[in-house]
Image (cartoon, rainbow, N blue to C red):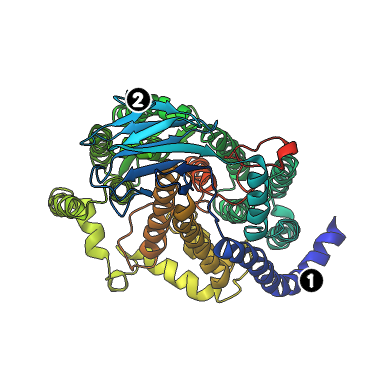
Amino acid sequence: MEVSQSVLTVVGPYYTAAARWVFVFLAVFILVKSIKSLLQAKNPSEIWAYIGGPDGSSTPLKHWENVIGRASSADIVVNLSSVSRNHGTLVRDAKGRWRYNDLHSKNGSYINGVRVKKSMPLKPGDILTLGGANFTLIPVSLQEKQENIKKRKRKSRPVSPWTSLIALTVFQLLTIVQFKVSYGEDCPASIPTAILGLCAVMWIYFILLRSFRRVAFEMETIAFFLSTLSIAATAVHTGGVIKQLICIIMGVVLFFLLCWFLRDLNRSKEIRMLILGVAVALMLANLLFGAAAGGATNWIKLGGMSVQPSELVKIAFIIAGSATLDELYEKKNLTVFMIFSAFCMGCLALMNDFGTAAIFFVTFLVIAFLRSGDFSRLILIVGGVALAGMLVLTLKPHVKARFAVWGHVWEDPTGSGYQQSRTMTAISSGGLPGVGAGNGWFHTTAASDTDLVFGLLAEEWGLIIAVLAVICIVTLGIFAVRSIIAGRSAYYSIAACAATSLFIFQTILNVFGSVDLLPLTGVTFPFVSSGGTSMIVSWGLLAFLKAADTRQNASFAVRLDDKAQGGAVA
């Protein structure tokens, strides 16, 4: 032991000097490959059926939800004056069953001569009459389905995950060596145990999903890479790496369960009110039993553990806000969501958690716009919230103090500007490759592994890896927005955009707040910051992005038919 320790003492500095650049090379290889695959990914539209018109033409149905009407924005445009601008909706469920719903059209809708008063099933061969014109639902033949699948496989083939997985494994193993070099005999056994545990979870997940014939793993590769940095950040600050590993495992399990849950939209809609009720209960429990930390009363202590209910509510918030196309035309659904949103943000204001309240508000704006498309209403809402924000600055001295520091941290670097000035100093001292995990000094600063984790990354892992971590989150956002074009359902599109807007805005607040480009609001960096609840919820939110991936055999949130049909998407 003494010999090996003396060897580490001699070789250690040389290892760190070389390993810093090896880590950068591996990170660039892992992430650029996954990022490039996501950005180049094509989400070709799927053809689910055809609608035959009175003139003998047939229009392909490329979404599960379609508006039929005279408006140019309709999915199926009918150029007849007797047809309303938005006459009705034709919606498919996960089992392939179609239903038609009339949108209070002026001349009504009929299926086989029966007037449609509420949602009715539409089967292949049924006659759908709109404004005196007859339409027919035509199913896709098995041969055409198989040909479409072959085309989709050629157009949307993702990058192979195995080389990235091996590179990430090497990255993790070298991280263990780095901590051994940095800490010597004082290196706790929990650090290598946690990193090896994460490596095992990662391999089990990839092998399991490949056995289910899934082929796209870019999002998960990014999430596992960021989770590796999270364990490293936790190790140098608090040492609670085993707890962080357990929370990552819980997050992966939640990710898997949510993807399964999202496979059935009917199930999602049926349980929505229950989830909304649980979210309300969590918020009320936080108000009644919450403990203060960092100025905000947003924690509940259960035994030796602390839980942040507002983080868990993020998932419920998106489930409650997302809607299928037929629901978008029912104002009561949007009204319920607006009331729920006001309740959540009001509770967060009472908890003094204004950073999370801002994240909820931005997510609300995204969902509200995607559901209504009404800019004027959103402008009024933003104006009202701006006035409320000015009132908060007047009534909440600690919030006003944070805004007063913003842009002036170097005027009092040892007082009010202490955290941000130290963060920027740490970033500059780390340079491009960093000083090596465990060799920095910034971990002695409070919240360096949570609110200021960007500074810790930049110091110990280097500015290149820190910036790559931010680019990862932005890439997820770009992919989610692009997936809307070929989205099966408005539900998946709204949920994915809401989740990614939450990710991006939260990252902006965390990174820009730590370097004084924005006020320091005390929010976490998704997947990277230490904290169990934040990690679990980050993985949970990733499920909404995974469900929006329409590439062939990419998302296990989408059912596959049996192998006899070539793995067709259901």
Residue 242: image location, x then y, percent: 63, 41
Image x and y of residue 260, in percent: 57, 34
148 lies above or below 420: above
Q: Farthest residue in the front direction?
A: 55
Question: Where is mark 2, residue-wise?
Answer: 113
Q: Residues within 10 Å of mark 1 (few under 14, many from 20)?
A: few
Q: Secondary structure at mark 2?
A: loop
Work out which quarter of the rendered image holds the N terminus and state it: bottom right
Q: Secondary structure at mark 1?
A: helix
Q: Is residue 271 above or below residue 165?
A: above
Looking at the rendering, in which quadrant would you find the C terminus?
Answer: top right
User: Residue 312, can we see it?
Assistant: no
Q: Position of residue 350 (x, y in %)?
A: 23, 38
Q: Is residue 337 above or below residue 375?
A: above
For marks 2 and 1 on the same chain, the one whose residue lies earlier in the sequence: 1
What's the residue type where badge 1 is placed?
A: Val
The numbered dot on residue 10 is: 1
Place of residue 184 in the rendered image (x, y in percent of width and height, measured from the top left): 73, 58
Judged left or right of residue 511, residue 102 is left
